[in-house]
Image (cartoon, rainbow, N blue to C red):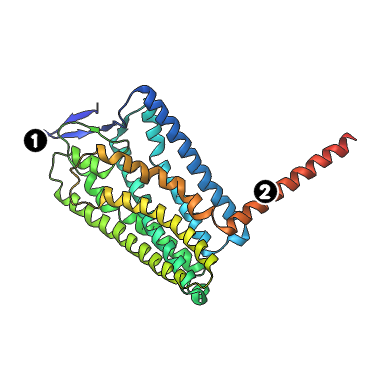
């Protein structure tokens, strides 16, 4: 259990919390540890590979791939802010987390999540310009403009969580320090607090509406215009290819926005945390795992860059092997 220091009015200064994680036998915990570890490794590997590929290939030095590179960088840190602790919980090594550690985890998880909301809307706007206004795209969206948009996304993502995090850090606790979740979320703190949480719930709700609903509207409006433009494309093959790409993008966006809206766009946080754990998994690890495959690895330019990279590697291997054969002779 947590360590307490008695204060006035039956309030306690919580020094640490206990994260329950997922219920189940040790065998189930081990299976889930292996599953989450594999997903985490694939997430990091996939996103880091995209960053390296974009950075090392000059053909990919365009605004679109600059946004995708930032998304990959973001996903690595978004998952790293929570998954290592989740893995430790599955192993039964350490379920405790300090008060400061819990606040920091909450701040970084929600800051990275908010940044992703803004970045996804920027990426959708970029695709809207490229498809619906191709003649003006290069003048409106150059590397300088894309850099400003990315910087704004990161800045707004980290600033918007400051007030909710400060309000949460001032909550008081009177009883249990057990968090019925696998990471520190806003809901968990509110459920445990014995003080009036009306203000923090309203602030969290308004913040979620502005960030999530605002981003969702921009993103899906952009895709509505994109789809409308595609419908007027004379080439049947071109329409089919464009719809294939858009459908995969929309599928991952529906999972992301659906899970975040379900989790955070609600007036009251005093709800059962059990029903939200699986949804948290979708937003924390499933979407970051799928993003590099959906947004990047399906692109023609990326496939070409990968083929060139593999071809270069095979040629170098062949040269080395021929050189060794000559030496042996």
Residue located beneath label 2 in the image: 310
Q: Residue at x 58, y 58 (%)?
A: 300
CB-based contact (under 8 Å), mark 2 and mark 1: no
Left or right, 55 with reference to 129: right
Q: How far apart, in angstroms, are the residues tagged by discs 2 and 1? A: 67 Å
Return the residue at label 1. 9
Q: Residue furthest left?
A: 9
Q: Secondary structure at mark 1?
A: loop
Query: Dot 2: few (<14), some (14–19), or many (≥20) neighbours within 10 Å?
Result: few
SS at mark 2 in the image: helix
Compare marks 2 and 1 and give the one earlier in the sequence. Answer: 1
Residue 121, position in %: x, y?
Answer: 39, 61
Q: Residue at x 46, y 45 (%)?
A: 289
- For the point 40% across and 65% down, the residue is 223
Decide which of 306, 143 is in the foreground and name it. Answer: 306
**Nearer to us in this view, 216 or 142:** 216
């Amino acid at each position: 259990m947590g360590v307490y220091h008695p204060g006035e009015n039956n309030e306690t200064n919580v020094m640490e919390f206990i994260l329950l994680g997922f219920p189940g036998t040790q065998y189930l915990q081990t299976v889930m540890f292996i599953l989450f570890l594999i997903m985490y490794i694939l997430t990091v590997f996939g996103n880091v590979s995209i960053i390296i590929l974009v950075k090392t290939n000059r053909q990919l030095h365009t605004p679109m791939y600059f946004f995708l590179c930032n998304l990959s960088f973001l996903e690595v840190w978004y998952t790293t802010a929570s998954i290592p602790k989740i893995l430790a919980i599955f192993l039964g090594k350490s379920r405790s987390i300090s008060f400061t550690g819990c606040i920091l985890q909450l701040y970084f998880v929600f800051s990275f999540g908010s940044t992703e909301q803004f970045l996804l809307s920027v990426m959708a706007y970029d695709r809207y310009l490229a498809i619906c206004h191709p003649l003006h795209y290069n003048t409106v969206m150059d590397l300088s403009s894309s850099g400003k948009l990315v910087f704004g996304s990161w800045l707004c993502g980290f600033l918007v969580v400051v007030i909710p995090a400060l309000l949460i850090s001032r909550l008081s606790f009177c009883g249990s320090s057990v968090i019925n979740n696998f990471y520190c979320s806003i809901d968990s703190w509110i459920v445990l607090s014995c003080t009036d949480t009306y203000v923090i719930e309203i602030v969290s709700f308004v913040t979620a509406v502005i960030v999530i609903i605002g981003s969702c509207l921009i993103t899906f409006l952009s895709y509505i215009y994109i789809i409308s433009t595609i419908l007027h494309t004379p080439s049947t093959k071109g329409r089919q290819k464009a719809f294939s790409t858009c459908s995969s993008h929309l599928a991952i966006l529906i999972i992301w926005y659906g899970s975040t809206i379900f989790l955070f766009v609600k007036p009251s946080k005093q709800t059962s945390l059990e029903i939200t754990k699986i949804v948290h998994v979708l937003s924390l690890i499933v979407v970051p795992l799928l993003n590099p495959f959906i947004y990047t690895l399906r692109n023609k330019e990326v496939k070409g860059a990968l083929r060139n990279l593999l071809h270069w590697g095979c040629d170098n291997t062949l040269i080395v092997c021929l050189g060794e054969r000559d030496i042996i002779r």
